[in-house]
Image: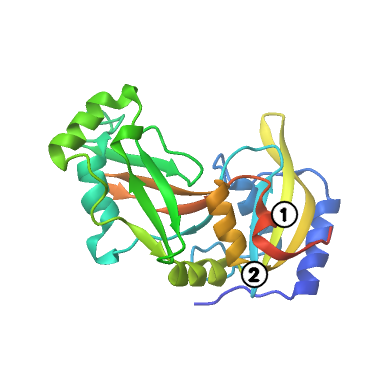
Amino acid sequence: MTVSTISEEELIDRLSEIVKRGWIPNNRGTNVGAMGNTLEDLLGLTENNLPIPNAGEWELKTQNLETTSLVTLFHCEPSPTACKFVPNVLLPHYGWAHEKAGTKYDVSERSFRQTIHAGSWSNRGFRVVIDRSKQKVVVSFDSARVDSVHADWLASVAASVGLNELNPQPYWGFESLEHKVGAKLNNCFFVQGIERKSNGRREFAYQQVWMLRGLSFDGFLWCLEKGTVLVDFDARTGHNHGTKFRLRPNHWLDLYREQTRVV
């Protein structure tokens, strides 16, 4: 397998030229990642989902300055991994009927989709807890925090496994999490842009380029504690789309020890 490589200086030069071009037609359809995919095409980079940077020793990330959407940092399933916790515990015992059960999917199709963080409890009673004494990021469940709108779902959980804390609790150890985030995002070129529609077609204008060095794991944990980094579960009976760590927009600089705007 060949991984595209490019020097730091050449990448800055090529990104500068792209910024100078102004509006550039989208060539990647309607998906939410089209701005980043178009930029990769302009740079001649091969898109990949491997746990290595996609521009030599640098990861390339793109964000629409006008969006409120979360940005995926990386995928990582919780421990204990042998349990396959999401499909084997959360989905069957804490899931609910998929919105397309009986139409697109079988009538028995279930869903477990939760985006949670440490700042507050979700309306289904889930939360991220940073346990520094045990060096773990833990998922917690508290039935008392479930909104009354989910009373029927809560009754189904009670009948399935009871209303106590998750047992075992899914978690990510600090050491493995630091390795994961560091290997993927230690150094990052972060490109911000805007988009518009012209004659019915999306166009992108890339406007700012930041060079971010030395991802800080303390900064990552701080963002988890403040709720600017979130954990996103997205599973259904037929497919687990993977557990993601995601970042709120405009918080990239909080993750790095060095931030330099280069364009």
Quarter assignment of residue 236 = top left
The image shows a total of numbered marks equal to 2
Residue at the (57%, 48%) spot, across then down: 226
> Where is residue 48 shown, x and y percent of the image?
52, 64
The secondary element bearing badge 1 is classed as: strand
Q: 118 above or below 174?
A: above
Q: Residue furthest left?
A: 159
Quarter assignment of residue 136 = bottom left
Is residue 41 at least partly visible in the picture? yes
Residue at the (77%, 57%) spot, across then down: 209
Please give the residue where the numbered disc 1 appears in the rendered image.
191
Placement of the C terminus among the 4 image quadrants:
bottom right
Three-letter code for the amino acid on which mark 2 is drawn: Ala
* Labels 2 and 1: the sequence-earlier one: 2
Res 55 label: 2
The secondary element bearing badge 2 is classed as: loop
Quarter assignment of residue 70 = top right
